[in-house]
Amino acid sequence: MPKVGIEPIRRKQLIEATLKSIEDNGLQGTTINTISRLAGMSSGIISHYFGGKQGVIEAAIRHMLEQLKDGLLVQLREARRQQVTPAERLRMIVETNFTGFQRSSSTAATWLSFWASAVHDPQLARLQAVNARRLHSNLLYSLRQMINDPQSAEDAAASMAALIDGMWLRSVLSRDPEAAFARAERLCKDYIDIIVRGVNQECV
Amino acid sequence: MPKVGIEPIRRKQLIEATLKSIEDNGLQGTTINTISRLAGMSSGIISHYFGGKQGVIEAAIRHMLEQLKDGLLVQLREARRQQVTPAERLRMIVETNFTGFQRSSSTAATWLSFWASAVHDPQLARLQAVNARRLHSNLLYSLRQMINDPQSAEDAAASMAALIDGMWLRSVLSRDPEAAFARAERLCKDYIDIIVRGVNQECV
Amino acid sequence: MPKVGIEPIRRKQLIEATLKSIEDNGLQGTTINTISRLAGMSSGIISHYFGGKQGVIEAAIRHMLEQLKDGLLVQLREARRQQVTPAERLRMIVETNFTGFQRSSSTAATWLSFWASAVHDPQLARLQAVNARRLHSNLLYSLRQMINDPQSAEDAAASMAALIDGMWLRSVLSRDPEAAFARAERLCKDYIDIIVRGVNQECV
Amino acid sequence: MPKVGIEPIRRKQLIEATLKSIEDNGLQGTTINTISRLAGMSSGIISHYFGGKQGVIEAAIRHMLEQLKDGLLVQLREARRQQVTPAERLRMIVETNFTGFQRSSSTAATWLSFWASAVHDPQLARLQAVNARRLHSNLLYSLRQMINDPQSAEDAAASMAALIDGMWLRSVLSRDPEAAFARAERLCKDYIDIIVRGVNQECV
DNA sequence: TATGAATGAGCCTTCATTCAT
DNA sequence: TATGAATGAAGGCTCATTCAT
């Protein structure tokens, strides 16, 4: 008798095992065996549910991107509900990007591998592009409300997106990621303040 | 009779072939065969000159870091010779980080793989740390001359370093890297202007 | 569903294939391919069951030593059961050392390779030492009952052990091993007779 | 200008380097590089003088056998000159087989490898057979003068040859080869005494 | 639905040999 | 005569995939 609904459970377990394995061994060191062992299942199960190794890895990456996207959605819905200021909304976006999940070393290792692979894997490149654009347009949405000149708003969005990604990158690779992330979040918010101030001041 | 001076030639050829292979196939897809074929040599040559695959790859990464470092040194020496302003010196640093070599897709692919590997390879992690600190301290040197408060200077250096890295990252992964790099350079310089302005204004 | 009990079967098959390969090609000429081909399996199976080439070879050597040891145990148990004389017990030990298995050319080739490798492989050296001591102490046990002087008994054991090994060696390397083994067994027993006579005679 | 007589010098140096390498690394671990490095020459020289790796190794084995043979010849010539007794002559043969050169670990490692290879290499098998027969017939020569019955003399020669080889083998593989060799020599001579006594006694 | 035994392609490495100098 | 740079076949090992159960 087929156990109903067991598929999503297995898929989730395997994706989590994959992220854990990438954290522990890197993408290079991740094999079908490291994954299935972490999941407490047989090696054949991966082909069964994901068609192969490439399958789970892509699913794991998608999962990671989804997490980031969902976190963002929750924050933005909250922002809309509370009718926060554009600046406040920007701060919430920053927070989402430095959330616990994003700081976790399994996510970190996966992100870096993801970027490295995206260069040669069109499938991953597409996912990457979608994700990059999402951050940019979400930032742009608020910045447009703060900055009159459309081009300036665009530039500010691009800068802020780069600042966030760069901060995340340097934090992940630093000796003390936890401290680095905390500082990163603060400095990104400082940047928002600079923009706010730049908008309000008359004397420049 | 020993052919004198052939070793450095071969090493250079092999390093270039390695960078090309990483560009074409990624670090994962780079094998001793892809490298030696690109170099037009036999597979044995790699172990002969670099002790093994790991050897060439590390040498290639070192070469890439060296290029960046040398470019920076040239710029900074020039800056000292011309006695440029601190802001001007910062602009030169930015330019170095968006130089033609850094924009090349072989460098790009190698950088990304490098970051991904650094997480699990202590040897590479060390190289990465050295490089990250170099950018930060070079930025800090100029920023200290522009900003009185030491903590603020530190923060500005961290932000600028992240902005540069983030810009580079997003440019590399963008659909039109060439345009993205040009814009990235401009926006990084704009950030310098913001700092300059922040220093000079009285009304904040 | 896991096939139960297949592991010991495979291990046995692979050990036999290894012995056969050493017989055919020597230890030097024995590769993972010669073994797996003789076993009618794929090359990967060896790493799967023995961790690698070194693994099967050590297992094969252990198997060979075990065979010798087991044969000896059976003989000695029988000797105790029948309460045979010390001299008779010595003859049984000799017979064990020239048993069909020990005469087989696969065992012969393996023994010789084993000795050659033991010089540089501490692991094998240990096995060799254990085995050498076993023969010696088993001989000594009977000789002590026949010879009063402890030192003389020790010497006789050492001589007999050397005689057996030397006979085995020369037989294995001779043109007609079968005939040589038969003669070897006879001459070793003659040596026992000499000892018996030496003990009983009064006229020396 | 060709240096006259340099060939035999080079050959000797390379043979010695080969024996040293077999001592250090075993036959398996001996490569053209280990040999040429020990000889302080280039790797190409081996093919130049010996046609290849197999060539030097066979030459080294031949050298070893020659040494043993020459030692024996010297001893036997001396025996004839001094008109020693048959028993004394046997003792001299024993001594030659436990001479310093035979005890040296380079010789030991080479002998063992030699036996292991002889099983599969007809060329080496021939050399081995010649050498085995030489010891046997030299022993037989003296034993015939001591023992009337031809078959008994044959048997005694076979036993003594086996005893010598077995003693040598067990000594080489023992933990303390030097002590083992000393004892081996003594016990082999004891065996000669047994034969002498057996011949003289009337009561058997 | 799930297992894990078995496969074999592909990788890195070693090393005897060749050959231009 | 002698070198050692270069080759490439062959070896051991890893691991994604398959498939009978």
Image: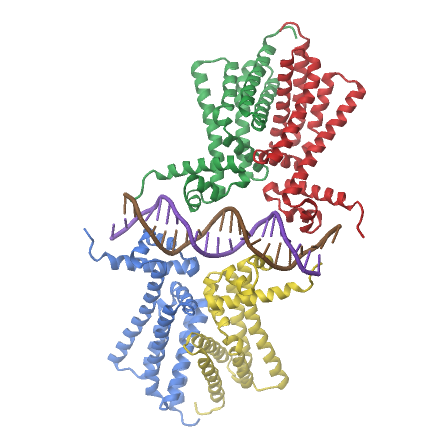
Chain colours: A blue, B yellow, C green, D red, E purple, F brown
Viewer-closest of A115 and C168: C168
Q: Residue at x 70, y 41 (%)?
A: D16
- Picture quarter containing residue A114? bottom left
Q: Is residue B186 visible in the rendered structure shown here?
A: yes
- Picture quarter containing residue A160? bottom left
Q: Answer with left or right where residue A81 lies relative to residue B189.
A: left
Q: Which residue is drawn at 50% across and 80% down?
A: B153
Q: How many labels does the image show?
A: 0
Residue B180 percent location from the top left of the image: 44, 80
Residue A71 percent location from the top left of the image: 30, 71
As displayed, is residue D107 above or below residue F17? above
Q: Residue at x 41, y 41 (%)?
A: C40
Viewer-closest of C58 and D126: D126
Question: Quick one: which residue is furthest to the bottom in this view?
Answer: A203
Quadrant where the C terminus of chain D is found in the figure:
top right
Residue A76 percent location from the top left of the image: 28, 77
Residue B193 percent location from the top left of the image: 48, 87
As displayed, is residue A78 above or below residue C108? below
Viewer-closest of B44 and E20: E20
Question: Quick one: which residue is furthest to the left in this view?
Answer: A1
